Amino acid sequence: MEEETKMKKNSFQELGWALGLMLLPVLYAIWVYQKLPENLAIHFDLSGKGNAFLPKFLIVSAFPIVMMLLEVMIYWTTIAKDILNRTFKHLIRWIFPFTFVSLYLATIYRGLNESFDVRKIATMLVALVFIIVGNYLPKKIQDDREPMNRKWAHLLVLLGFLIFIMAVFCL
């Protein structure tokens, strides 16, 4: 019982650090708020031009709140259904904050600099997800789940590396 309480306390500390990390780019956005255009692009077409926009007030205030609520849900699910592989549990808990920080900063920077290429960052993140899925999901993660077929795992890792290389050199 005492060990379970300690684990939950550590989980809440880790959640606090994750939410703190997610707040850092918001502080930057508040700092450059006056320089941002009234509407910021939140979706981009294949050429990198924005095709969906939101007011900067929503991007700076509401969007981070929604993302932090999603992060709290991720933590809650990893506490409610414990993941046996500790490395994977931490990966699941931290991939979302780092992805949010990367994409949020890219969105803010794109608002400040029209020539900034968001596609490269987005493509690298997709590649990273493929690499992670191919690396970790094949292993038995939860008590009642079967591991992924190794052939699929190798295919996902290869696909992830190819996409990552494409993002670095082609875009």
Image: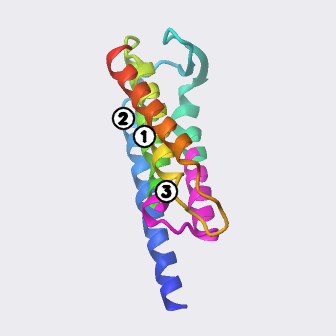
Q: Is residue 111 visible?
A: no
Structure colour scheme: rainbow
| Mark 2: amino acid | Trp
CB atoms of marks 3 and 1 within 8 Å: no
Queried whether the magenta region covers residue 81, the answer comes back as yes
For label 1, the SS is helix
Which labelled disc corresponds to residue 93? 3
Q: Is residue 80 left or right of residue 23?
A: right
Q: Quadrant of the N terminus?
A: bottom right
Queried whether the magenta region covers residue 78, the answer comes back as yes
Q: Nearer the viewer, mark 2 or mark 3?
A: 3
Which labelled disc corresponds to residue 101? 1
With respect to residue 157, does 89 lie above or below?
below
Residue in front for this viewpoint, 74 or 92: 92
Quadrant of residue 168 in the image? Answer: top left
Residue 156 image point, x, y percent: 51, 37
With respect to residue 124, does 142 lie above or below?
below
Q: Nearer the viewer, mark 3 or mark 1?
A: 3
Between discs 2 and 3, the one toward the N terminus: 2
- How far apart marks 3 and 1 lie (CA) works out to 14 Å
Q: Nearer the viewer, mark 1 or mark 2?
A: 1
Residue at the location (64% across, 59% down)?
146
Q: List the residue tagged with mark 2.
A: 31
